[in-house]
Image (cartoon, rainbow, N blue to C red):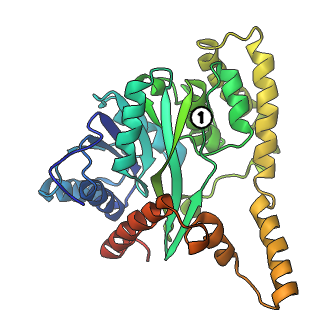
Amino acid sequence: MKSDYRIAKNVSILITTYNRSKFIELYLEFLEINNFGGNVIIGDASSKKNYLFLNQKIKQNTGINFSITHLHVPKVEENVSYSMNDCFIACLKEVKTKYVIMTCDDDLIFPKTLEILQNVLDKKKQYNGANADICWVGKNQINVNWQVRNILPKDPIDRLNAYIQKPFHAMFTLVRREVLDNFVPQEFRKLQFNHFAADYSWILSIVINGPIKKINKPFIFRQWHDDQLHQQNPFLSYEKFTNSEFYEHDKKLFLDHLTKQISLKSSKLDINVELAKFFQKYEEFRFNSSQESTFDKFYKKVQYQVVKIFGKKITREQINDYLRGYKPLFFNKKAYMFIEVSKTIQNLQKKYQVLS
């Protein structure tokens, strides 16, 4: 419930956007409803017309009670990854807070949990980052990704190996400002594989730069809608990338980027050998991620047994509901919080018509 009390005051939220003003308006209202008190810095790659339109909307919104910096960072070329890097780099230059988190315009950060994570980093200097649970919401669906977890080894190579055992989207981690000093490859415009140029670099850089503490609270609410980035700009699959003529070139640049960061923090004697071992596991994960998931296999087994015993067909969504904690069988306080926040988001989605 909205009040005069403000939370997460020492946090900057960096948001990238491109011609999606409704999502930014929704995001700002969501943060205001939940009493955010830090800074929002928007890197906007939109056309000048759309940038000015949104900028005027922000200035006219007198109901917002936190700091907003709205930067115009026009696309230099038609490459989503390059543009997002340009936006994040521009946003970072404006950060004046102790902590920072990166996000996109449709991935909502829950301020109440952000405040808790800020306090964790204030009290626990051994952590460079802190995160919590990720949820997908939209079209009357709620789905929690339970993979987010602690990554606590002291050496960066050991952290990478711990991370690859069960990878998650580490981009959504609240970090100390200095963690992001080198998270973008210096020569990212020479990388043709978009994932190496952007999100894979961001994720692994955050893991390399220090231990990450996870708490069990709802944190990131990712929105299902018909204007998803991967639908507009489908990236080359990892399998096709490994068969491309630029694979070896991009792989070398990517590993060089990681090596530079690791060398500043690792006590391992042969970083290149250790990194090569990790990267082999990483590639295996990227290949296998396109195959049938463990849940898909589990679902088929459960469905078969239900049909066999009861003569009824159970849907994937029904199994999901029970496993995720949204039915009485596994109902708990955290599930209730997910549902309550998701209802707020679904109302805002209807208000701003972002699902159509």
* Residue in the image at 80% along x and 61% along y: 292
Q: What number of labels is visible?
A: 1
Residue hosting label 1: 201
Residue 153, horizontal then vertical, whole percent: 65, 24
Residue 245, horizontal then vertical, whole percent: 79, 40
* Residue in the image at 46% along x and 52% along y: 220
* Residue in the image at 26% along x and 43% along y: 7
Amino acid type, label 1: Ser
In this image, 295 relative to 182: left or right?
A: right
Q: Is residue 231 above or below residue 195?
A: below
Quadrant (top left/top right/bottom left/bottom right) for the C terminus: bottom left
In this image, 278 relative to 149: left or right?
A: right
Q: Is residue 345 above or below residue 118?
A: below
Q: Is residue 62 above or below residue 280?
A: below
What secondary structure is found at the residue carrying circle 1?
helix
Residue 64, horizontal then vertical, whole percent: 18, 53
Q: Residue furthest right?
A: 308
In this image, 128 relative to 38: left or right?
A: right
Q: Is residue 14 visible?
A: no
